[in-house]
Amino acid sequence: MCSMIEIGKKAKIAAIKLAKISLREKNNLLNLAADTLIKNTDFILSENKKDIDKGQEKGIKKSLLDRLMLNEDRIKDMAYGLVNISKLEDPIGEVLYMKTLPNGLKIGQKRVAMGVIGIIYESRPNVTADAFGLCLKAGSACILRGGSDAINSNKAIVDLFRDAFNNKIDNNIVQLVEDTTRKSAEEMMKLNEYIDLLIPRGGAGLINSVVKNSTVSVIQTGVGNCHIFVDESADIKKAVDITINAKVQRPGVCNACETLLVHKNIAEKFLPEVCEKLNKNKVEIRGDEYVKKIVPYVKDADDNDWETEYLDYIIAVKTVDDINEAISHIQKYSTGHSEAIITENYTNANLFVELVDSAAVYVNASTRFTDGNEFGFGAEIGISTQKLHARGPMGIKELTSSKYIIFGDGQIRE
């Protein structure tokens, strides 16, 4: 097993070689990786089963097992994601602007590769393929450090990629840190000499640890205490459908709805219907006193529920007097990920969009759309909940840097 410094050195060398290849060569590698996933589906599934079996033995909750699980369709989706990335325009070399100064100097800004990108993540083996594909298209080598719960799946995917790339490029453009102890993560956070950007993906504990302890530049991603506010003018059917989709379609992901805010003037019509459907989908509902008066089987919510990212079949429900109270609640408890308003009132829709300060703000749509694929980016490396230098779903452009290019004709500074 290589030391972290050895992995860093290899990635740095591979990144230099990667910078020299053409767009066609990058796309060929992406399509080769996609074909490799499909051809080796049975092997990947057998390795993933080891992780699933281990997770079940440890008693991991159902929603997190779902994040860990691969099947034929999910492997096809991973491969499709890589093919999609190959079809995207090359961000590298794009001239962002060019102007001529009064002294005749032509100064411009050009998009360039970051170099080496490190990703520390939990569960979700699909991240392994997505992260590699986006980094490759963005011209950077990647160092992937997944969690112990997905080590067999991650190792299978990365080993297959590296074997496929032999004799085609330095296969250290993608490396997996096989040591899943805390020590390896801590070492990775200090690898300034070799890693240009570090991206954590996972729960609040992981993300906060990386943000707090890393000396490598970090983009903070992903904790999603996402809200839906059902305004008094909302279309009931629309509100029910959106809420069920945002909570139930895949509850263990960061863009799932965790808190439902309901205007009191619509609560008696809306709550019985939405709670019945949530209940049928085995979602535990925790509500305030007003919610419980309308739907007696709802459990008590406390202050902790308003700030919790459940990643599970649980939802907190609170009634509010008006849109201003809803916005205030979101401003207090939101993690800056995704929020939605369901309304037929144009003024309220605009007010919500204007005052809710999250990476993605929706009107009459599910928060589940906060995703690189859904936004047309081909894939994503994560959802940035900070404001510099990227925010929201991070596609290939967010994985690049820039440099100034200056053309002169003998100018000297006086």
Image (cartoon, rainbow, N blue to C red):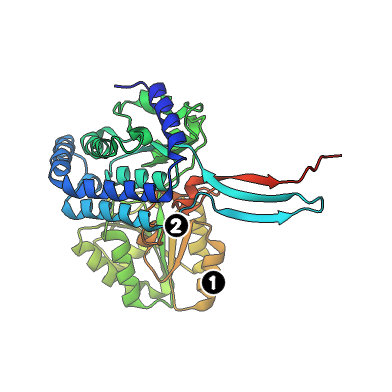
Q: Is residue 229 visible?
A: yes
Q: In the rendered structure, are the residues bearing label 2 and label 1 in contact, judged by CB atoms less than 8 Å apart?
A: no
Q: Is residue 186 visible?
A: no
- Indicate the position of residue 121 as horizontal and vertical percent values: 35, 39
In the depicted view, which residue is nearer to us: 354 or 215? Answer: 215
The kind of secondary structure element at disc 1 is: helix
Residue at the front extreme of this rendering? 409
Give the Cα distance between marks 2 and 1: 33 Å
Q: Quadrant of the C terminus?
A: top right
- How many marks on residues? 2
Mark 2 or 1, closer to the camera? 2
Q: Report the residue at 40% width, 76% height from top.
A: 234
Sequence-first disc among 2 and 1 = 2
Left or right of 141? Residue 298 is left
Q: Report the residue at 24% width, 61% height from top.
A: 297
Please determine whether, in this image, residue 188 is positioned above or below residue 393: above
Please determine whether, in this image, residue 44 is positioned above or below residue 96: above
- Indicate the position of residue 257 as horizontal and vertical percent values: 35, 58
Disc 2 target residue: 89
- Estimate how packed mark 1 is, as few (under 14), some (14 to 19) or many (20 or more) residues with alpha carbons within 10 Å: few
Q: Report the residue at 52% width, 59% height from top.
A: 328
In the depicted view, which residue is nearer to us: 106 or 73? Answer: 106
Which label was assigned to residue 350?
A: 1
Q: Specify the amino acid type for callout 1.
A: Asn
Left or right of 150? Residue 341 is right
Residue at the right extreme of this rendering? 414
